[in-house]
Image: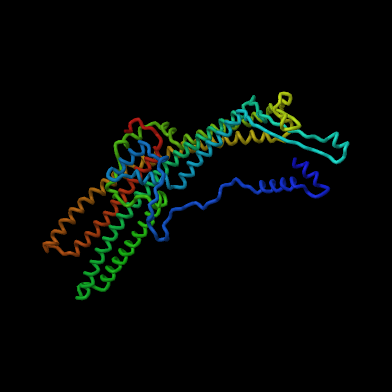
Amino acid sequence: MILASLHEGWHGTWSYHAILALLILLQLGGCSLAPVYENPHFKVPQTLGGANLTVDTRSDTTNVALSLEEQRFLGDFSPRFDLVPLVTQALVHNPDFRITVLQVQQARAYYQIEHSRQLPTLSANAQGVRQSYSAVDMQERYGQKLATVGIGINDFELDFFGRMASLSIAAQQRYLATRYGQQAARGALIAELLRAYTLERATFQAQAYYSAIMEDCAALMAFASSQHGVGLISDDELSRQRRQADQAQVRAMQAISDHDAARRALQLIAGFEAPIGYGTLEELQPSDHNDWGLRDLESTVLLQRPDVQQAEAELRARNADIGAARAAFFPTIRLSTSFGGASDSLQGLFESASRTWTFMPQLTMPIFDFGRNRANLDVAYLRKQAGIADYEKAIESAFREVADAIGVRPSLQQQDQREQTNLGRERLRIERMDKRVALGLQDRTALLVERISVEQMELEYLQARQALLLNRIALFRAFYGVHLSHAS
């Protein structure tokens, strides 16, 4: 109808119907189905020096519920303080983990697309054709007015050589690979969060120790100044004491900066709304009975790790790609068919005499493609070889992570025990000195010097404890997703 209207208005004034049709086409051409763009909402403090957010926004934590194994580890790692809300908030907030979740959903959609191609698509179509000419002879020979409507299958490929099946298998394996990748990312995120939490708590405690050292050095400096005023110590001794006090003050200021940096690192992982700021390293448990017997486990248990299974799934997908590349050398058979009606008027479309049926098989055989199919097959083989190397690399990396974490653990445990024992003795000695000073039996300056020494030992024990806790977290990361028969 549009073509006829345009043709009638070609030699004269455009008709009302032609103008209306043109306006409708222009209007349809300007439509867009894209959603309205909105800037994403981000959650950071209002100022660069801000800390936690002041608003209370509750995130949906339905899809990030912790497993029993994760809850058990968090309970063993921090028996006094519940770390589940912190970990849950990190899984909700962390952009990297959200990307892995979206990648799984994308891979699932791609797999659905490839799988649906193995099944025929039923579609309906309607068409109207009106063609007229000014010349009478041309109008009699070529003029036509026809309306058709039908339902059928269009361009369905018969998968005689398994190309579509191979593509579907490859998409399925890549979907499984993304799921394993999401699980591996989840374990890495939890481990990184616990590591950041441990460092934040360690720097917070170190800040208190450095502040105590600074105060004791300031007290010694005051004693030194009074002694220098009456000529009991020299200028050099006073300068040495002032230098120690200045260094202690600088270290205390640096400890504040270190804690602020550790706190920001934790908030970057868990979000600025995450509940942080509780617990000490002494209240965390660096070991439990699950650590026993790890050296005697067979190395094949590492095949259960999500990153290793991800590499294996990707290798299976690349193996299926070879099947699809091989099938490209064989003929492609496509089928199109439809059933409907055809008439020169809309009223007669559904009469029995206007029924139509079409059947159009098509066979395509590659003859000369200038080596394209051969190159695609070579690429598929090379990608599989690279997948084998990636799979071997994942296993070797997993073995090294576990071996390193297990190998260094005995020395860290021994160092932690020795530092704790020595620190306990020194604390008792300081208590006895403090009592003697209170009774006037000992000089206070000697007590301050010894207190500074013990506070240095507190920092050394804090570092030993931190190293042992980080090793515990590394073991959790190394065995994440691995079922240990002796684990409770």
Q: Residue at x 75, y 46 (%)?
A: 18
381 or 360: nearer the eye?
360
| Total numbered labels | 0
Q: Position of residue 414 (x, y in %)?
A: 28, 44
User: Vertically, is 225 above or below 372?
Assistant: below
Q: Residue at x 42, y 45 (%)?
A: 92
148 or 40: nearer the eye?
148
In the rendered structure, the answer to whether residue 482 lies left or right of residue 329 reads left
23 or 294: nearer the eye?
23
In the rendered structure, the answer to whether residue 359 lies left or right of residue 441 reads right
* Colouring rule applied to residues: rainbow
User: Vertically, is 418 above or below 449?
Assistant: above
In the rendered structure, the answer to whether residue 454 lies left or right of residue 157 reads left
* Image quadrant where residue 187 sits: top left
User: Vertically, is 179 above or below 334?
Assistant: below
197 or 9: nearer the eye?
9
In the rendered structure, the answer to whether residue 47 lies left or right of residue 468 reads right
Q: Position of residue 296 (x, y in %)?
A: 35, 32
Visible residue check, residue 420? yes
Quarter of the figure with the N terminus: top right
Q: Position of residue 59 (x, y in %)?
A: 41, 46
Q: Residue at x 21, y 75 (%)?
A: 229
Quarter of the figure with the C terminus: top left
Visible residue check, residue 333? no
Residue found at the far bottom of this picture: 230
